[in-house]
Image (spheres, rainbow, N blue to C red):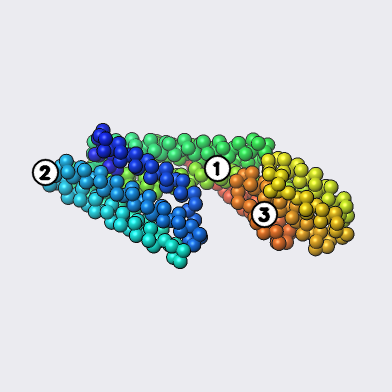
Amino acid sequence: MFDVRFGVDSLFERVAKLIHFAVMVTFAIIGTKFDPNSPHETYPTMCQLSICLFVSRLVLICQYGSVMLWVKGHKKIIAPLSIHITGFAIGAVLCLSGFFMFNSQSSGQFYIAWYIIIVMEALAVFLSSSQWPSVSFEHTNLSERCGLLTLIILGEGIIVLSKSMNYVVQGQNFSLGIIAQIISAVLIIYFVYMLYFDSRTKYPPSSTLHHFWALAHFPFHTALVLLMEGTSRFITWRNAMEIVDNIYNRYDTIWDSTNSTISLAPQFQNLSTTILYEAQADPVKYNVTGYLHTLRMSEDASSEVAVDAAFGVLLTLVNATLKFFKIEAAQKTTRSRWSVMRKIRIRIWVMRSLSMISFFCISSSRPG
């Protein structure tokens, strides 16, 4: 918002952009540890994010303050710039207060204030710009920049989608559901592109609708990023669940084929070797030797010891497969194998249903 109206080529502006870039990179690195559900463990991350937000607001205050120094003789520009600076100053104070609010004893809910700060700052900039033509977005390239950023997000979505498809290629799991899901994801990106660029209405740059249109890009781009990431994760999750379902089916076949622990152990070993090789799993971390030894030593396949050992083999193979797809794996091994299988298959049924619904909705959509 600052650059499209007041950006100039100077040493100060280049340093300011460098700081903004550093804040963005730092925010992206630290943001990977963001977990509001575990405030007592992640409060250092919250404090670091608060400092990043404070620094970014401080730089914006300096930038708008430098503009005020250059136009101090024009009273019509001083008032809206003062509103800009006041909004960012309030946001900076609140972000800095978050640094002291987050601690090991806090509830960790202060991060909600970040969203309120963003909305407040955006409203302060856009409302004042709509009331004072001297700082409006007329004769700026705001519309072009919004369009380019949308195009960049869609392009990144295609790249992320291609990475998800690599898992399908490596696993050679070209089922009808996976293929339909990939087509649905491509159609989602295509229709979003068509709906945005083909039906865009040209508003006068100084109008209220134009300001609202620009302001709406903040939640729109956030939703678009989540949509692009969600479509790719959806394919990855579906592919992983189909492979896990195949593991359970092969496990059931082996388990139901014999009641002898002596014959069960070699079959489970062959299954483990195949699955761990396909999942490129660490043989030390995902080691089933102990479970197989316990299974051989058990006299009765229906005993609790044998069932737990067999379930340990199954859970290890499932966790190795999920790790290959970068999905968080289960850590507990005390559940009943039947309850775990039931939950996994319910997830598969839900994913298949959602895939069919999304494909129907996208297929029935029309751009424009």
At 78% from the left and 53% from the top, the residue drawn is 290
Task: For the residues labelled 3 and 1, say whether their Cβ atoms are less than 8 Å apart.
Answer: no
Q: Is residue 26 visible?
A: yes
First in sequence: mark 2 vs mark 3: 2
Q: Disc 2 or disc 3, which is closer to the eye?
A: 2
User: Splitting the image into 4 quarters, where does residue 332 fall?
Assistant: bottom right
Q: Amino acid at mark 1?
A: Ser
Q: Residue 161 location in percent, x, y? A: 54, 38
Left or right: where 242 falls relative to 66: right
Q: Residues within 10 Å of mark 1 (few under 14, many from 20)?
A: many
Residue 344 has which mark? 3
At 63% from the left and 38% from the top, the residue drawn is 168
Residue for badge 2: 73
Q: CA distance from mark 2 to mark 3?
A: 69 Å
As drawn, the residue found furthest toward the left would be 73
At 38% from the left and 50% from the top, the residue drawn is 52
Relative to 266, residue 187 above or below: above
Q: Amino acid at mark 2?
A: Gly
Residue for badge 1: 232
Q: CA distance from mark 1 to mark 2?
A: 54 Å
First in sequence: mark 1 vs mark 2: 2
Q: Residues within 10 Å of mark 3 (few under 14, many from 20)?
A: some
Q: Is residue 363 visible?
A: no
Question: Which element carries disc 1, helix, strand or loop?
Answer: helix
Question: Which element carries disc 2, helix, strand or loop?
Answer: loop
For the residue pair 66 and 264, the one nearer the viewer reads as 66
Q: Residue 27 location in percent, x, y? A: 42, 47
Left or right: where 92 falls relative to 152: left
For the residue pair 9 and 257, the one nearer the viewer reads as 9
